Image (spheres, coloured by chain):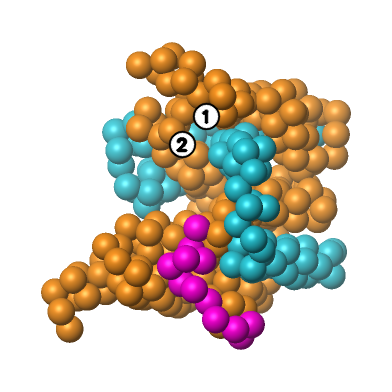
């Protein structure tokens, strides 16, 4: 193995194993939302996109209906469509079977690692190694999380209830940092989503306020592409 | 209830898979429209913001103030200090457990 190949494999494996550990947090959140172990494990194997999985069980855990829960998962899942478009030139999936297979691993981490690689061959390698290591670790740790959480008592349950909003905040946080593109607008959008959801909570079935908040904020309209320069000036 | 959960799990999984497959299958021009790009840029912030609020401060149709808000503040502080994800979760969980024991 050449040095660049070795370093790509090492970085991809490291990221995959580290990220996959959070499967335990998902398993615990799924248990807190009332899913059984098989449902949690099926989600990690079949859905395999962390933010959507957390959103689905988060809405169910808040007492929301299945439609609102699935809708939230889809909204977050649209990211992966854009990632796929960016990965096509790099992966060049030939044939239906390969396309069907590669699709499942198109997520935040595999896209980031593949696009960061110095050339096309290493990009493919990074995608495959990151995908395989996250997939295996995420699924194994989901089982650990959901089975572990089922055995917990009252105080541990309170801890678990407290972990779920913290997990969402941690997923949101990188978008609020000033290094993120249009961070000022991202902050307004996130705050808007939170306020609209809280205001609607007493009036709509649980879970619906989450979808309604997203629709309201998107309709209210973040600045269009042409106004980006103004947002950039605000930040400067 | 269990059937509904399975339906949500399976329908959600199928839809999320199809969203991924679409990316590798549709012409790039369909997805690279400016309005699609704007939605993809901003929907996650709105959705995650709403989920943080709902998970931390509601129960059913009621607004509730309890240990979860204390945990959220602890998590925010840890994130501001650039703590790793797992440390943030452990601190938030510990704060939640502490409030439960004290209250």
Q: Residue A105: percent from the left, percent from the top?
A: 51, 70
Q: Which residue is mark 1?
A: A186
> Which residues are drawn in magenta?
A86-97
Q: Residue A38: percent from the left, percent from the top?
A: 66, 76
Mark positioned earlier in the residue sequence (1 or 2): 2
Q: Residue at x 75, y 51 (%)?
A: A71
**Chain A: what color?**
orange
Residue A93 magenta-highlighted: yes
Q: Residue A119: percent from the left, percent from the top?
A: 30, 66
> From the viewer's perspective, is A226 left or right of B64?
left
Q: Which residue is mark 2?
A: A175
Q: Residue B87: percent from the left, percent from the top?
A: 34, 48
Task: Tell me if residue B27 can be seen.
Answer: yes
**Chain B: what color?**
cyan
Label for residue A124?
Answer: none
Few, some or many C-alpha atoms within 10 Å of disc 2 (few <14, some 14-19, many ≥20)? many
> From the viewer's perspective, is A178 left or right of B68?
left
Q: Quadrant of the C terminus of chain A?
A: top left
Task: Tell me if residue A50 can be seen.
Answer: no
Chain where mark 1 sits = A
Magenta stretch: helix, strand or loop mostly: helix
Q: Residue at x 64, y 43 (%)?
A: B33
Asked if residue B16 is positioned above or below residue B87 in the image, the reply reads below
Q: Quadrant of the N terminus of chain A?
A: bottom left
Residue A34 magenta-highlighted: no
> From the viewer's perspective, is B10 left or right of A52?
right
């Amino acid at each position: 193995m050449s040095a660049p190949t070795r370093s790509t494999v090492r970085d991809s494996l490291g990221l995959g194993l580290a990220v996959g550990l959070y499967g335990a947090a998902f398993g615990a959140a799924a248990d807190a939302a009332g899913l059984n172990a098989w449902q949690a494990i099926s989600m990690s194997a079949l859905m395999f996109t962390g933010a959507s999985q957390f959103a689905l069980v988060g809405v169910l855990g808040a007492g929301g209906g299945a439609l609102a829960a699935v809708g939230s998962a889809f909204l977050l899942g649209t990211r992966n469509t854009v990632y796929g478009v960016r990965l096509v030139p790099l992966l060049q999936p030939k044939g239906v079977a390969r396309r069907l297979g590669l699709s499942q691993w198109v997520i935040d981490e595999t896209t980031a690692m593949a696009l960061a690689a110095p050339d096309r061959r290493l990009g493919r390698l990074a995608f495959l190694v990151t995908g395989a290591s996250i997939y295996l670790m995420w699924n194994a740790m989901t089982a650990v999380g959901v089975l572990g959480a089922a055995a917990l008592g009252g105080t541990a349950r309170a801890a678990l209830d407290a972990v779920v909003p913290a997990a969402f905040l941690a997923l949101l946080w990188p978008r609020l940092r000033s290094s993120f593109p249009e961070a000022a607008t991202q902050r307004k959008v996130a705050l808007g989503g939170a306020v609209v959801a809280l205001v609607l909570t007493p009036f709509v079935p649980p879970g619906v306020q989450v979808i309604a908040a997203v629709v309201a904020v998107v309709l209210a309209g973040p600045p269009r592409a042409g106004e980006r320069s103004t947002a950039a000036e605000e930040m400067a | 209830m269990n059937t509904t959960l399975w339906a949500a799990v399976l329908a959600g999984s199928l839809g999320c898979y199809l969203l991924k497959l679409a990316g590798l299958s549709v012409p790039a021009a369909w997805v690279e429209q400016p309005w699609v790009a704007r939605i993809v840029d901003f929907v996650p912030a709105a959705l995650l913001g709403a989920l943080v609020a709902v998970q931390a401060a509601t129960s059913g149709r009621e607004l509730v103030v309890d240990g979860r808000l204390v945990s959220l503040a602890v998590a925010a502080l840890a994130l501001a200090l650039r703590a790793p994800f797992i440390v943030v979760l452990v601190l938030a969980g510990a704060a939640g457990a502490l409030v439960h024991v004290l209250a």
